[in-house]
Structure formats: structure tokens, C-alpha cells
Image (cartoon, rainbow, N blue to C red):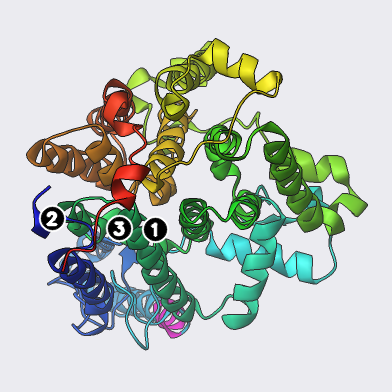
Amino acid sequence: MPPHLHPRSRSTTSLFAASLLASLFVVGLPHVFPCPAPRRTLADSEMTVDADGQPIPRVRRRRRKDAEQFSPDDRSLAQTPMATDEEVSTFLQLEAEAAQLSHAGRECPVPKPKGILDTEIDWSTYMQQIALYLAGERDYTLIKGSTGPLVYPAAHVYSYSFLYHLTDEGRDIFFGQVLFAALYLVTLVVVLACYRQSGAPPYLLPLLVLSKRLHSIFVLRLFNDGLAAFVMWLAIWLFQKRKWAAAVTVWSVGVGIKMTLLLLAPAVAVITVLSLSLVPSIRLGVLALLVQVLLAIPFLQENPAGYASRAFELTRQFMFKWTVNWRFVGEELFLSKRFSVALLAIHLVLLVLFVAFGWLRPVQSRLPGFVQNLLTGRHRPVPLSKAYIMTTLLSSLAIGLLCARSLHYQFFAYLSWATPFLLWRAGLHPVLLYAVWVLQEWSWNTYPSTNTSSMAVVLSLVIQVFGVLANSANAFTDTRAKQAGKEHIQ
């Protein structure tokens, strides 16, 4: 590796700092420039925006020309009452619009000081559910909002209860967006630290700050996926630091926010078993389970079955109109049971392939021999490199997302920062790596999803998963000894 590309070189450090400053610029830029408005819409008139924050043209009512049906002699007599009715109707319409504007404020496609960006999707529902929880309701089956019941575990409730108090019971959406912008920046710092510890080349770093969809998920939509993504990357960083108990605890808390982080469970099991052997890994598994129980105690005391069925619902039926990844297969196949069973089978097969041909490379043993040594107590812990740990965790995540029953736009919070690293571990040339990243970014920014965009989503995940598997000889090679022997390059 050239000296200027070494992860600890001065140029890499400069690019690390530049990437962080660029993220600050991207997030802060909308607060500097004025709010854009359509050319034919006054700045203080009512605007309606779609799910991507784009203005929807107002439908103007045409004036009725009822007076034309009268004769010239009668027109003068009919003109006065018709004008009066029209004026009353127009006045009432303008009065209603003024009342709406007085409550809604000035709408804008970007978050602005002294304004409200009314593009939140689930925030109001979150706040309604939290209000019920704070009022004393502990039965999960009875906690509901305007868009549906509470379907996230207990840590989600505690996190948004904190935000409920900070944002004036959820009414101050703008301050909530400021908090999530800060969360985005903190998460980015953790991601950059993980990349640097793994020895990732500096040309990957700009890709970490350029995603439009990722900014939308964090800053505009206020989804809990942003918080869960932060916890996921913090757990990855702790695993790289070999803080096993802390890493498993943080990861379990992330599962308590959204169970998407369960996709990391196979990799967590493999990493802890290779590093600590079987019995300590079982202890860590019990620790993760205890964290879930402790978080859920208030709800388990009221209705344990209701909590388990709602917080960790595995049989949920997804709606075809919201899918981002499988739209091209058609609604009939998407809703069929055989499709979900096929995805589950592919998921299991891919996990076995990665365990057999990738994740076990540090022990240099085949799967049957490794299992035999593990059960007979002959397995000895092996040191794992930080790059191996991050590759294993992110590949487990990518496998789960590839085989997911349905992906929604907010799931991009987990994938966006993982993609550059996985494409690099797949051995792709930088030009091809950037091309795949652009394809994925385009597909996730297409709203609503189309057959073409959904195929692009699946294709980009296929390239990441099978690329890492095909390059497993290099992707999962433990280079800890080599990295430890390198001196710091000034």
C-alpha cells in the first residue's frame, strides 16, 4: 500500500477531518439559504408536499359561469346574487386556508429556523403512543396511534419518551429535527472511526457523507431507524475494541429499539465463539437476553404475550405498495406464502455458506471439524482483526437485507454506510465501486419505487453479498499480525 493511502498516514487523517467537515456543511447548508418556493406560489401561501418534500401544485377551482344561462335582460338582475354567493364562498375558503397556515407555519422542503417541515411520517404516531405510555398504559396491545399500533420493542418507547419531553410533547418538530441532525453527525463520527480502525482506504470516506436518502431518514423523517443505526455502529466499534460485554449489551439495546438489528445475531455468535470459546459466548448470549427482559419488565408484568407478539412480530403481513426491493416480482407473488418461505430458505443457505467458506477462515478449519472441536472443548480462542470483525458483522446485515420480506425506505439507514466497506471487501475496483454506489443511491431515492428501481436495490445487495463471498479468501483473512507490525507513518 502506498504510504499516502495508509490508514494512519497524514493524508488519510486530513481526509477523515475533511469528510466530517463536509457532513457539517451538507447538514447545515439548508439553514443558511432561503426556503425555495415554486415560481407560481407565493412564499406565504399554502403548499402541500409529497413524501419526498416536493411541492404538489394546488388545484384551483374554476369560477362557475352560471350567469351565462340568463338572457341579457335578466343578467343584470342575476349578477348581484351570483357575485354575492361567489364572494362568500371565496371568503370562507380563504378564511379556512388562513386558519391552516396559522397553525402549520411556512412549509419548506428543507428544515429552516422559525419554520416547520411537515414531512414527518411516523413522528406524530410515535408521540401519540408515547402519550398513552406516559399516561400509565402498559398493555402493548392497547398502545396505538393514528397510523397503527405500537410494533417496536421497549427501548424505542423509552427513547421517544425522552424526545417527547424535549420537543414539547412532540409539537416542536423543528427542534426534533435539530436533535436528529446532531444524531446523524455523531453516528457519522462513529462510522468513520470504524472505517479507520479497519484500515479502509480513504477513497471510501467521501461516500459516507453524500447520501441524500440517508439525510432524509435522519433529519427529515425522524424515524427510529436513525437511532438504531447509531447503536449498531457503536456496537461494531466496541466489538472492534474487544469490549465484548459492552458490545453485546449495546447491541441488545439496539435490538430493543428495532429488531432489525437481530440480523447481526449470527455474526455476533461467530465472533464471540472464535474469540472467547463456547461457554463465555453462551454467557454473553444470556446477557443479551437479560437486557431485553430488563427493558421490557413494565410491559411483561401487564401482558407478556401481548408485548412479545407486538414488539417482535415475525408474521407481519407487509403491504405491496410500500416495498422498495421486491416490487418487480408482482403483488400476487409478493403476498404469497411460498415467496416468504423461499426467502427464509435462501437466508439460511447464505448463512451456512458464509460460515463454511468465509467466517471460519481465521481458525483454518472446515465447518464439521470446527463444530467437533467446539463441542469437545478442543477449540482455542483466536485473535480477530478489526477488519474481520467489521466485515463479518456487515456481511451478516447485508444477507438479512437481501432476503428481507420487504424493505422500506428507512431501512437504508443500516445499509448506506455499510455498502462502501462491503464493496471494498468484495475486491471491486474503485471505479466499479463508485458505480455500484451510485446505482444503489439512485434506486433508494426513486419514489415511489418502480420495477427498475427495485431490481437495482436487489442487484446492489447481490453484488455486495456474493462479491464478499467470492472474495472470502481476502475479505475474511485475519491480518491482525501484519497490521500490528506496521509502524505509524508520519
Q: Which residue is mark 2?
A: 5
Q: Position of residue 467 (x, y in %)?
A: 26, 26
Give, as a single range, the part of the protein colored magenta.
95-102
Residue at (55%, 44%) from the top-left corner?
261
Q: Is residue 195 above or below residue 44?
A: above
Q: Quadrant of the C terminus?
A: bottom left
- Find out whether the residues at labels 3 and 1 contact each other: C-beta distance under 8 Å: no
Q: Main secondary structure of the magenta part?
A: helix
Q: Quadrant of residue 63?
A: bottom left
- In whole angstroms, how far apart are the C-alphas of marks 1 and 2? 32 Å
> Pointer 3: residues within 10 angstroms few (<14), some, or many (20+)?
many
Q: Is residue 185 left or right of residue 351?
A: left
Look at label 2 and name its amino acid.
Leu
Look at label 3 and name its amino acid.
Arg
Considering depth in this image, is 489 or 463 the residue closer to the camera?
Answer: 489
> Pointer 2: residues within 10 angstroms few (<14), some, or many (20+)?
some
Q: Which residue is mark 1?
A: 217
Q: Earlier in the sequence, mark 3 or mark 1?
A: 3
Q: Position of residue 219 (x, y in %)?
A: 38, 67
Residue at (45%, 63%) from the top-left corner?
120
Residue at (74%, 48%) from the top-left corner?
287
Q: Is residue 50 visible?
A: no
Considering depth in this image, is 403 or 193 the residue closer to the camera?
Answer: 193
Q: Is residue 180 magenta?
A: no
Look at label 1 and name its amino acid.
Ile
Residue 196: mark in rendering: 3
Q: Position of residue 293 (x, y in %)?
A: 80, 50
- Find out whether the residues at labels 1 and 2 contact each other: C-beta distance under 8 Å: no
